[in-house]
Image (cartoon, grey):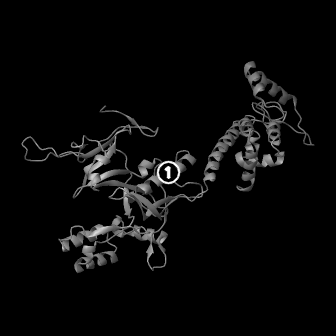
Amino acid sequence: MSNAVVTINGAQAALPTLLGQGTARIPAGGKIRAGIKVLTKKAAEHPKAKEIYERGVAASQSFEDIERAISEAVPELKAPLIPKNVPWFTVRPGDFPNPEIAKEILAAYGEDRGDGTKRLYRFPVVFPADMWQAVMPHELIAWGANEKKFWSEYAPDGRVRYCKCYAPVPMDPAGKRAIRIFGGRKTTLRQDNGGLCDPEACREYQNRQCNLSGRFIFFIPGIKSIGAFELHTNSFYAMNAAIQKFETIAFMRGGRISGFLDGKRASFFITKTLKEVPHIDEAGRSVRVAHWIIELEAPIDLTALLRTNEDDETAIINGDQAARILEGARPAGETDGDAPFSGVTDSQVPTASNGVEVESPGTRSQRDETRAAIPQTQSDAAGEAQPTRGGGGNGPSVEQVINAAAEFGIDGARYTAYAAKRWGPGWKINAAGRRRALAEIESFRDDPDSFINKVDAELGVFA
């Protein structure tokens, strides 16, 4: 397998490389925080810690930098800051490689809700991939002093959840020097629990040292950045609700959640909602506490997404019709009684002064020769494919479709307007379009009122 060839998205085959064997990841170009950090009660009583905190917040420093500065100035304060749940998101220059991006985000989508400070409460997002697992990665994770200590990871079949950790760094045979590792530290299964992730039996999880951690990965319309932005969350409720939104939109859009949601550049929005969420207290009782929960919104007309798919089908029908015309074939479902196209163009057919076509002997001879050159079997097949004067061809005629609608009490003019809006004007002259129209009517044979309501909605609500 050293020279294995890998095909990517059906494109040209690509050879594997030294750095191209890992799982594809979307690079992040900055962080938006879900909340803020404030001084602990003990730290708030220390004047030096309070001064450093207030100065750092005023200078828009990251909370990590503020906490580090407090710990260095006041060593007895090991963890001087704690998270606080607030209704807005934190956007700080120190969380972006280009600090100006933070200012651009606040300028574009920040709001002043009466306290004199512009903050980020709600903003549009566009996701870069169609798998929600790729744009909302998450895991159970326990942190050590400087790095991840343990984390969860599923087997390739998605059935078994493992507990992983970093493998010990190997030493040289003399045991005096660590061996240089290529491609980063190796990982292995955690040995003391059999390598299985079982939160109910996990010491770290029960001691709240291991928790669910996830992040949304997205782009923000109008904000220029080669890397995506990320928003971390530890909320099971936020992530579970987001999965439901992702799956609903994907179902409506044929499996897609990436990009703008429709032709009007509609997008998802991320905001916060105050909700009462249940949790189990130390005594095993279920209690409810109000929290600001990250919420994913999709403020669009979902029925319009369904109609977008129908428009795609109509484009296929009309595109086939256009291709037939450009290739010189008679359009499918043609209703006049002329003979099949013989290869003689309109410019070759002379006309009298009154505009009536006159067939000259030379033209007649040329047409006869063209027809004679067609094999008998091919000529017969062309004759069978020729639609009838009523527009039937290989499918029902237009009159048959309209009569079927009339049985439901829908007059011909109204149904014709409905069908043209739903499938485009090409439905009449395309056998597949007429078959689809008749099949739709027949599917409502046992419930005509529903079909009447559908026609009314198409002509009224979606006018």
At 88% from the left and 37% from the top, the residue drawn is 357
Residue 183 in percent (x, y) is at 25, 46
Q: Amino acid at mark 1?
A: Gln
Q: Is residue 227 visible?
A: no
Q: Secondary structure at mark 1?
A: helix
Left or right, 208 with respect to 91, comes to: left
Q: Quarter of the image holding residue 71?
A: bottom left
Asked if one can make out residue 270 in the rendered structure from this viewpoint, the answer is: yes
Q: Is residue 278 above or below residue 407?
A: below
In the rendered image, residue 297, in percent from the top left (x then y), is placed at: 52, 59
- Above or below residue 382? Residue 443 is below
Front residue of 265/70: it is 70
Extreme residue toward the top, this view: 376
Q: Residue placed at 42% from the left, 52% from the top? A: 136
Quarter holding residue 186: top left
Residue 201 location (% of width, % of height): 28, 46
Q: Which residue is mark 1?
A: 244
Residue 14 at x, y percent in the picture: 38, 38
Q: Residues within 10 Å of mark 1 (few under 14, many from 20)?
A: few
Q: Give the side of residue 6 with respect to residue 71, left or right.
A: right
Depth check, front residue: 307 or 81: 81
Q: Please state, as top left, top right, bottom left or bottom right, where the C terminus lies in the image.
A: bottom right
